[in-house]
Image (cartoon, rainbow, N blue to C red):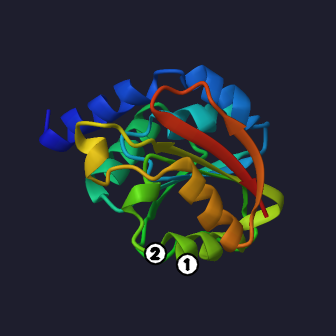
Amino acid sequence: MSLKGILAVMLNNRAKEDAQKVLDALQIKRGDTVADIGSGGGFFTFEFASRAGENGRVYAVDTDAAFRNRIKKIAKKKNIGNIETVVGEPDGCPLPQASCDLIFLRNVFHHIKNPGDYMKSLKDRLKPGGRIAVIEWEKSPHGRFSAGHYTASADIQKIMMAAGYSHLNFHDFLKKQSFNIFGK
């Protein structure tokens, strides 16, 4: 297995913790369109695809070609036809206008250079009533999370509200992570 394959497996293993609670909180329905920004190893991409069903669509968005190719390969092997991979861009996301019921970002917010502008660019990608869910690491007194590999929940809320979103919900069941949901 390649180094990227090993990393994808590690990311997926980490994503499984409390995943059912996350999925239940997101309330994805049959026929929904979901964008998984920073899809990484694809764990949530495939979960979203299952919940959205064959009439739904999932955009697996990542800057890393190896991760996108891995998702394509698995989807083809498992005959999952409602996943489309999309090249992630630093300044926005090339998704169709008014296409998404849900945009999901898990542990990627801290990687976005200009999060306010990036989030503003996502507004037009949401359908009326669409939501953005942001799961992000909280600051830890030691380890990588103290070195900028996180964004505090209060900062996420401030950035999202400045970008024109309303704060709909906060979930506190994830260890060392915040889970916010915003509406247009």
Identify the residue at horizontal 29%, vertical 58% (top origin).
65
How dense is the environment of label 1, judged by Cα within 10 Å: few (below 14), some, or many (20 and up)?
some
Q: Name the residue type under label 1.
A: Asp
Q: Quadrant of residue 135?
A: top right
Location of residue 30 in the rendering, given as x and y in whole percent from the top left corner: 79, 37
* Alpha carbon distance from label 1 to label 2: 6 Å
Seen in the picture, residue 121 relative to 34 is either above or below; the reply is below
Query: Is residue 147 at least partly visible in the picture?
Result: yes
Q: Is residue 22 left or right of residue 73?
A: right
Disc 1 and disc 2 in contact, CB within 8 angstroms: yes
- Secondary structure at badge 2 equals loop
Q: Nearer the viewer, residue 150 or 38?
A: 150
Q: Name the residue type under label 2.
A: Asn
Location of residue 29 in the rendering, given as x and y in whole percent from the top left corner: 79, 37
Q: Quadrant of residue 53?
A: top right
**Quadrant position of the C terminus in the picture:** bottom right
Query: Is residue 54 at least partly visible in the picture?
Result: no
Q: Quadrant of residue 26?
A: top right
Q: Which mark is residue 114?
A: 2
**Quadrant position of the N terminus in the picture:** top left
- Secondary structure at badge 1 equals helix
Seen in the picture, residue 154 relative to 44 is either above or below; the reply is below
Identify the residue at horizontal 57%, vertical 43% (top origin).
81
Q: Is residue 136 left or right of residue 14?
A: right
